[in-house]
Amino acid sequence: IHYVAPTVWAWKPKRVHAFKARYDRLLCLLPFEPPYFEAVGLDAPFVGHPILEAGADAGDGPAFDLRAYDYLEDEKTDETVNPSLRRQAKILTKHGLFKVRDGIYQVRGFCVSTVTFIDAGAGWIVVDPLTSVEAARAAYELVTEHLGAKPVISVIYSHSHADHYAGVGGVTNAADVAAGKVSVIAPAGFLKEAVSENIIAGPAMLRRARYQFGLTLKHGCCGEATSGLGPRPSMGTASLIAPTIDITHTGQELTIGNVRMVFQITPGTEAPAEMNFFLPDHRAVFMAENANLCMHNLLPARGALVRDAKAWADYLTESIRLFAGESDVMFAAHGIPRFGTEEIVAFLANHRDAYKFLHDQTIRLMNTGLVASEIAEVLKLPDVLAKQWYNRGYYGTMSHNSKAIYQRYLGWYDANPANLNQLPPEPAAKRYVEAMGGQDAVKARAAEAETAGDLRWAATLLNHAVFNDASDRQAREQLAGIYTKLGFEAEAGTWRNIYLTGAQELTDGVANLSPVAANADVLSATTTPMLLDVAAVRVNPAKAEGKSFMVNLRLTDRDETHLVTVENGVLIHEEGIEDKDAGATVTMTRAELIMTLLAGFPVAEFIEKGGIKVEGDAALYETLTGLIEAPKPNFNIVEP
């Protein structure tokens, strides 16, 4: 692996600032260890953010700052960062341009994911272009600086998560794709999954993602120390260009430029739409996010549909049979490559066995009567698997993954009647605190548990105290202290971020962040039925009570018709249908539908300007928009 003198960027939307850190070319002696390098020259570092210092809007802040993890080099961080996590974080944040093998290069450490550039002769094939336009553009510029100027002739999205496609605007543009200059390759179903996975429960997922990724934590020895899978996601501009080539089946072959590719479809593994591919002329296999530098999540803490551990393991078995024996190098969408056929086969087999063990033994214990929390307490990988660094729980954990498998098969209910209709957290807390002798008694017992090193029990006690009386500052600070200790101990980057974010919100309150609006690229790719699904889950039933009506929607720019029916507190929509008995027919563009139905712009203003035209009851569409309630992006989590 060659570390090619990197340019270290602190970049901002619309404006770019840079400082240089020149390092010698190096050879990684061990693929499992953080690369050792010696600085041979360092220009004056870029200090501060002049745009912010000049009073510009915070939206112009850096998309990513490669200096953020410098603190990991300080040995004193072992006091506040689990040493195992610190080692993992140093590997994940080693940034720059790396040569995987002739014709294959990666830029790592510029985002939570890794972007790959494959030399196809006439230009680059770019694989998984990071989370933001700014990060992807900086990576492309670094490649150009060291490897020469070449156009991008193809982009591959390995799967439907944003950190693998949202930076596409930094390496190409929609016009070149439309003109046929650039192809965009993705697994079948990619577009639907990319725009739908987070659209319905998006606000709740985004709020929870603050915890999973530590998005509001400061960088430093007492803050965020990566997610365990990669650095913090870059926070720049998101983009999306629809695929032009769908990969529909395993064994499908493509040639882009002078590069031959053979694909393997792996739906339902780490993403609903995902694929691996093999480069026979390079003897190299790309494993997307199906094989990682650590154990992955079967159910992310931010929330998602539960992933299928058995299918994941089975597809890895297929990968071994199809590609591993013909590969000299394996690379992926996160982490570092593996070298040598024997090493690749062993890695994939051991990684596969970890997921299969998780699945099979969770089911075995489940069938003996253990509930999810009991399984999580006793289930451990065999030593032969557990000693492998890539099976350790830096991102996903045995504990959470076993609970996810239980949930996939049996759901949330553990069959104990006491848990069939439990009290919600706040009233339960008040009764627990009363039964234990009051607020002061609970805090005293928590202090005793902390002294005894029983931090989990102390957290449980103090959580009840806070939900009993959120104004009790002592209880809040006591619980924040427990969460901080649990965060410092955690080997999983996600657990560390979750504990420390909980501590932050207990002491400082919830950061009042603005809701994230979908950009034009994402909105363009989102179908109108999906948008109406969003409206349906935002109907306030109290406002809809007693209302029964139908509205025809005509979207002129998309030549679409949709019938919307409101009855019994429910919004139903049907595509391609108009009803002559509808109370109103509303003609408008899709942008006007989004602005009035979902963004809260007054309907009357659009009607007055002639943009929206209504036949029938002129007030009926306004009644419809009045039923839609905006989500709350900053709801409480660690307090009632």
Image (cartoon, rainbow, N blue to C red):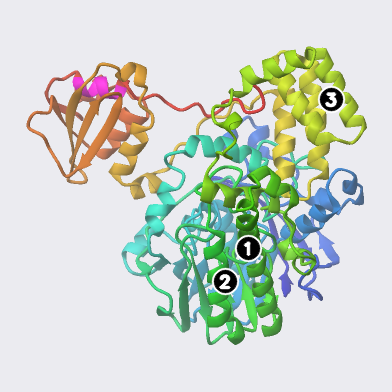
How many angstroms separate mark 1 from mark 3 (CA)?
36 Å
Q: Position of residue 224 (x, y in %)?
A: 74, 43
Q: Which residues are magenta?
A: 620-625
Q: Is residue 47 left or right of residue 235?
A: right
Query: Which tag is nearer the camera, tag 1 or tag 2?
Result: 1
Which residue: 38% across, 32% down? Answer: 537
Q: Which mark is residue 355?
A: 1
Cβ atoms under marks 2 and 3 closer than 8 Å:
no
Give above or below for 69 relative to 21: above
- The front one of 185 and 190 is 190
Q: Which mark is residue 316?
A: 2
Mark 2 or mark 1, which is nearer the start of the sequence? 2
How many angstroms separate mark 1 from mark 2 (CA)?
10 Å
Q: Position of residue 20 (x, y in %)?
A: 73, 58
Q: Position of residue 350 (x, y in %)?
A: 69, 71
Q: Quadrant of the N terminus?
A: bottom right
Residue type highlighted by circle 2? Leu
How many angstroms separate mark 2 from mark 3 (CA)?
45 Å
Res. 44 visible in picture: no
Q: Quadrant of the C terminus?
A: top right
Task: Tell me which corner region of the image, top left, top right, bottom left or bottom right, holds residue 223.
Answer: top right
Label 2: which secondary element: helix
Residue on which disc 3 sits: 446
